Amino acid sequence: MGIQKSRLYHAGIPTFMRSEYLADFSNLKKGTIAVAGVPFDYTSGSRSGARFGPRAIRQSSLYVDYFLGSSNDEVYVDLETGEMFQISSELNIKDLGDIDCFPQDLNATMTAIRTFIKEICKKEAYPLVLGGDHFITIPAFQGFAEAHIERQKRARIGYIHLDSHLDIFDNNPSWGKFYHGSTVRRIIESGLIDPENVLLLGMHGTVGLESWEFIKKSRAKLVTLADLRKNGFEKVLRLLMEEVVQKTDVIYLSVDIDSVAGMFAPGTGGITLDGLTPGELFKTLSILADYPVEGIDLVEVAPEYDPSERTQRLAAEALFLFFQKKGLIAR
């Protein structure tokens, strides 16, 4: 008689979704979701704390695993769509732990992140990057793009930035050229992407004139939160993505948790008073999952500002939903 195993939410080693931990890339197989944490927030121009984001998201992902294991059912039904799906008995996920970060050495940190993500992509695995502040997307995107361009010459790379903020500052008087408010600018100027293949989603509020003029000059596509709500998420995103896939081969998606309104996601450094609802975030990711998004990060979860843990829970459930809709952990 076998020993009964428990899947309690609060017990066990918190890898993402209780996936197997891999100490190196040698056993990383094609098509596997490869989780990498980046506990770095030393380039945050707002409240720090996102360095604890990877650990918090992993911990909250255990609740998703607990829910799935708390029933004898093998098939689940989406109450809103009626869609049925079955979770694979062994999730196609491997957790590679955290990437080495160096708080006082930005160049070393960027090199470590870029090299790590590039190695994941060279293995033809699917990078899932847990931040960290939004600066970490710069080297993560670079590693992703370089690997795909090396594999397929002239590969056309797309980038989607889901955020309340544009992150398009050039040279901030306090933080310089490399911080979490310059992510999009540095990606556009990287030489790895045609700026026309940059899609900025969910922004609201105000922006400086220089940033506004740079967007127009760069030819990046800006779709505000008001645009999405006025014309409908389904209609707007489907039309946008049909255009994007005509011009790109692979897409990198970066999700800032502050794209969600602060009342739903208070655990972040740059909290906003408007933003997506959780349902709108889930809707957006469900739609984007239908397209060739081959790498994703989720950043700016700062758990100490949210004792309720709903911010990290939202992050974990959003990522699970994305991969479920993409067919990588369910059938």
Image (spheres, rainbow, N blue to C red):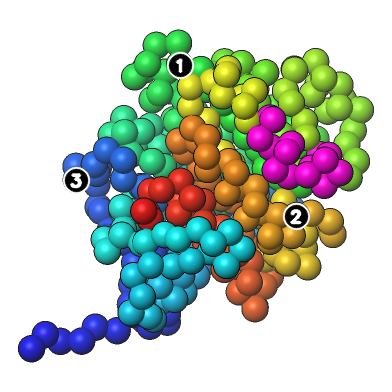
Disc 3 crowd rating (10 Å Cα; few below 14, some 14-19, many 20+) is few
> Residue 46's x, y, as percent?
74, 53
Left or right: residue 36 compared with residue 27: right
Residue furthest to the left:
1
Q: Is residue 168 above or below residue 3?
A: above
In the picture of the structure, the residue carrying the numbered disc 1 is 155
Quadrant hosting residue 243: top right
Magenta run includes residue 119: no
In primary-sequence order, the first of circles 2 and 3 is: 3
In the image, 57 versus 244, the foreground residue is: 244
Q: Is residue 22 above or below residue 18?
A: above
What element does badge 2 sit on?
A: loop
Q: Are marks 2 and 3 in contact (CB under 8 Å)?
A: no
Amino acid at dot 2: Leu
Q: Is residue 280 above or below residue 183?
A: below
Q: Residue at x 27, y 38 (%)?
A: 30
Viewer can see residue 40: no
Amino acid at dot 1: Ala
Q: Can you tell which mark lies on residue 27?
A: 3
Q: Which contiguous range is marked in magenta?
A: 224-240
> Residue 176's x, y, as percent?
71, 33
Prevailing secondary structure of the magenta residues: helix
What element does badge 1 sit on?
A: loop
Magenta run includes residue 237: yes
Disc 1 crowd rating (10 Å Cα; few below 14, some 14-19, many 20+) is some
Quadrant hosting residue 104: top right
In primary-sequence order, the first of circles 3 and 1 is: 3
In the picture of the structure, the residue carrying the numbered disc 2 is 276
Q: In this figure, what is the number of numbered marks?
A: 3
* C-alpha distance separating marks 2 and 3: 38 Å
> Residue 162's x, y, as percent?
67, 43
